[in-house]
Image (spheres, rainbow, N blue to C red):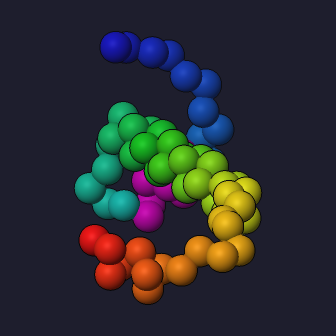
């Protein structure tokens, strides 16, 4: 899909300088993939501490039953 974007030229040049092999198209796609991965990781981190476990949970007993 062709999309026209107005990207800050200084940012684009700085990013291109970090990866000699990248074109602007590849660079934008990579940036979007990294952005999505980071946001997904942040969502997972938000879940920590939200699950309540029973206080009497015994993992050793659970292993013996399996």
Residue at horizontal 35 percent and vertical 79 percent from the top:
63
Closer to the camera in the image, 28 or 11: 28
Task: Please determine whether, in this image, residue 61 is positioned above or below residue 38.
Answer: below
Q: Dividing the image into 4 quarters, which one contains the N terminus?
A: top left
Closer to the camera in the image, 60 or 3: 60
Instruction: Please state if 47 lies on the left or on the right of 60 as rendered.
Output: right
Q: Residue 5's x, y, as percent?
A: 55, 22
Q: Report the span colored magenta.
A: 11-18
Note whether residue 17 is visible: yes
Q: Is residue 17 magenta?
A: yes
Q: Residue 18's x, y, as percent?
A: 44, 64
Closer to the camera in the image, 27 or 49: 49
Q: Residue 40's x, y, as percent?
A: 54, 47
Residue at horizontal 71 percent and vertical 74 percent from the top:
55
Task: Please determine whether, in this image, residue 62 is positioned above or below residue 30.
Answer: below
Q: Residue 34's x, y, as percent?
A: 47, 50
Q: Dividing the image into 4 quarters, which one contains the C terminus?
A: bottom left
The count of marks equals 0
Q: Give the dominant element type of the magenta stretch: helix, strand or loop.
A: helix
Instruction: Please state if 51 lies on the left or on the right of 25 as rendered.
Output: right
């Amino acid at each position: 899909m062709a999309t026209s974007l107005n990207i800050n030229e200084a940012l684009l040049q700085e990013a291109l300088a970090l990866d000699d092999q990248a074109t602007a198209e590849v660079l934008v796609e990579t940036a979007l993939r990294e952005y999505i991965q980071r946001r997904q990781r942040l969502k997972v981190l938000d879940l920590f501490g939200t699950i309540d476990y029973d206080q009497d949970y015994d993992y050793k007993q659970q292993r013996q039953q399996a």
